[in-house]
Image (spheres, grey):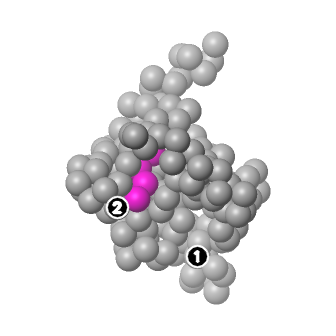
Amino acid sequence: MKRAITSPLGYLWAMPNTLLGVAMTPLTLLSGGRVRFERGAMELYGGFAAWFLRNVAGGAGAMTLGHVIIGRDKPMLDFTRDHEHVHVAQYMRWGPFFLPVYGLSSLMCKWKGKNPYLENRFEKVAYGLFPCFGEPPAQEIAQAAATAGENKPA
């Protein structure tokens, strides 16, 4: 019951960050990317979303902005979904303060000579609950390719 009461407030509290992710939707779609909804979050992948992750976000496989999860491709989203949903919950808790506090955590890590990504307090929680280092297993990539073939019009 608590989730039903706090969830709408969490969506509202995370909204400024979610809007940053939503703003990427038109470019993602126009560049051949896709959008889907999973477990209460919008997922963008391919096209501009993949370009953004490679060229702006340091080569990340996925990242979260509020209730928008941006992924390089479908297999990577499937592989990182649980990890990224930890960040969705963090956005619901921290709201518009999440990005500044996340950045501050990374800055403090760098200042202390630690890895600013892996030692970031928010990433440590997400990786502690759902480690997803590297690339998706080959079987997940094959399954995603088979699923994509089933969804193509004849």
Is 42 within the magenta?
yes
Under circle 1, the secondary element is loop
Residue at image mark 1: 116
User: In percent of the image, x 45 and y 26: which residue is there?
Assistant: 9
Q: Main secondary structure of the magenta part?
A: strand
Residue at image mark 2: 47
Q: Nearer the viewer, mark 2 or mark 1?
A: 2
Q: Residues within 10 Å of mark 1 (few under 14, many from 20)?
A: many
Magenta segment, which residues? 41-46
Q: Quadrant of the C terminus?
A: top left
From the viewer's perspective, is residue 125 above or below residue 105? Answer: above
Return the x and y of residue 136 as percentages of the image width and height. Answer: 67, 62
Amino acid at pointer 1:
Pro
User: In percent of the image, x 52 and y 53: which residue is there?
Assistant: 74
Amino acid at pointer 2:
Gly
| C-alpha span from label 2 to label 1 | 28 Å
